[in-house]
């Protein structure tokens, strides 16, 4: 449906470089990136607000690289909603159709349908300065969707909403996608990707550094930057050697990891998810496990229950349930055993 082929665009000191992207019909694609990574600039190129210096943009196999925004069959909803403050909700939603000079009866029917789909039928006569953030977002969506775009672009659509409004809007977006709407959604929030995306890309310094299904990207991050988006905090720089038929990774602080058949190498990066680690008061006897002794140096509440920091020469961050905390009777300065399977360790080549 959408293909970006080697897109390059310089904007002052910043540049989008070598962007290649394919999006099939009905896909929900989330593009993750920090502020300044280039995600909004990329949306603007796809929408036609800007044009690339080089490269090609195809929509349904048609070259739209230099087409005007109004000729692209693409809708975009901006982070600040961009509703017209001097118009009520009905007139905001109707605006694109009035520009096209559709007749009043057709406009009224389409506005009613769009407003009902967004669950804002009851506020059509209300002024926009009286609306909540969630209502404004729905107005902006209805105004965009009324033109039946082939592709819907969303710029941080959830960033200014509280938790309950986010949940409502996520449900609405999932339903839109389920009904066939193709969506590209840019955000800095990992949670948006987990709850909405069918595919995800991570953009950093103007380049898409990893792309794939949610499981592919977050279970096998290619570098530390992507791993941080997956909530991974355990990073270990090691030299890998072969010992007695095993691959062993050793940090500069002499912490040793049993690895799952990794080739020898220097300055390798190991990643280990917080919830892949189990804490024990006594050393397990399973020789297949990594078993490392350490001391509790911090215990703090987290969304998972508690996060425990263990100093074993290198620091380990462990998520555990509050009930497990009570069973283990963990306290700061307690000695504990950190255990995990070698299968849970991811070795990456990036920084």
Image: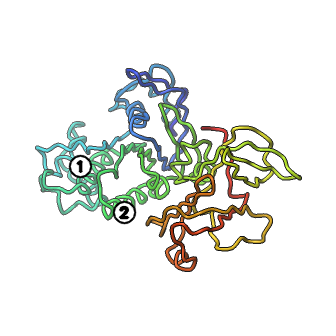
Q: Describe residue 117's horizontal placement relative to residue 304 as left or right.
A: left
Mark 1 or 2, closer to the camera: 2
**Image x and y of residue 236, in percent:** 63, 47
Q: Give how far apart the Cα atoms at labels 1 and 2 are.
A: 32 Å
Q: Nearer the viewer, residue 246 or 205?
A: 246
The foreground one among 81 and 205 is 205
Residue 111, position as x, y percentages in the image: 24, 52
**What's the residue at 73%, 61% (across, down)?**
290
Tally of marks: 2
How far across and down, in percent of the image, does residue 86 sit? 10, 43
Q: How is the image coloured?
A: rainbow
Q: Is residue 44 above or below residue 12?
A: below
Along the horizontal axis of the image, is 221 left or right of 150?
right
Q: Secondary structure at mark 1?
A: helix
Q: Residue at x 34, y 59 (%)?
A: 166
On residue 106, which mark appears? 1
Could you tell which of marks 1 and 2 lies nearer the N-terminus?
Answer: 1
Residue pictured at 41% horizontal, 46% vertical = 187
Residue count near mark 2 (Cα–Cα under 10 Å), binned few <14, some 14–19, many ≥20 = some
Numbered circle sitting on residue 54? none
State the SS at label 2. helix
Side (left or right) of 120 relative to 299: left
Where, quadrant-wise, is the C terminus in this rendering?
A: top right
User: For mark 2, what is the residue?
Assistant: 167
Q: Residue at (71%, 62%) from the top-left corner?
A: 341
């Amino acid at each position: 449906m959408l293909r970006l082929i080697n897109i390059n665009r310089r904007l002052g000191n910043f540049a989008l470089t070598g962007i290649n992207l394919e999006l099939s019909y009905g896909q929900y694609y989330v593009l993750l990136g920090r502020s300044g990574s280039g995600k909004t600039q990329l949306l603007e190129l796809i929408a036609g607000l800007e044009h690339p210096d080089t490269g090609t943009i195809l929509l349904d196999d048609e070259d739209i690289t230099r087409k005007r925004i109004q000729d692209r069959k693409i809708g975009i909803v901006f982070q600040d909603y961009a509703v017209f403050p001097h118009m009520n909700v009905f007139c905001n939603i109707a605006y694109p159709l009035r520009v096209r000079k559709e007749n009043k009866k057709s406009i009224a029917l389409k506005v009613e349908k769009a407003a009902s789909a967004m669950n804002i039928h009851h506020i059509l006569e209300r002024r926009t300065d009286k609306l909540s953030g969630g209502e404004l977002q729905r107005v902006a969506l209805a105004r965009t969707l009324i033109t039946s775009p082939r592709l819907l672009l969303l710029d941080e659509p959830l960033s200014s909403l509280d938790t309950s409004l986010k949940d409502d809007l996520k449900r609405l977006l999932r339903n839109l996608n389920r009904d066939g709407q193709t969506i590209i959604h840019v955000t800095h929030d990992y949670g948006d990707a987990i709850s909405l995306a069918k595919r995800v890309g991570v953009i950093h310094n103007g380049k898409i550094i990893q792309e794939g299904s949610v499981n592919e990207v977050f279970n096998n991050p290619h570098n530390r930057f992507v791993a941080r988006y997956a909530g991974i905090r355990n990073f270990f720089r090691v030299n890998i050697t072969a010992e007695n038929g095993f691959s062993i990774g050793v940090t500069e602080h002499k912490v040793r990891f049993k690895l799952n058949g990794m080739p020898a190498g220097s300055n390798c990066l190991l990643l280990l998810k917080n919830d892949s680690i189990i804490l024990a008061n006594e050393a397990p006897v399973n020789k297949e496990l990594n078993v490392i002794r350490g001391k509790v140096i911090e215990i703090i509440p987290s969304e998972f229950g508690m996060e425990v920091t263990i100093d074993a020469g290198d620091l380990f961050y462990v998520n555990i349930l509050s009930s497990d905390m009570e069973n283990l009777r963990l306290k700061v300065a307690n000695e504990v055993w950190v255990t995990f399977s070698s299968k849970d360790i991811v070795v990456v080549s990036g920084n």
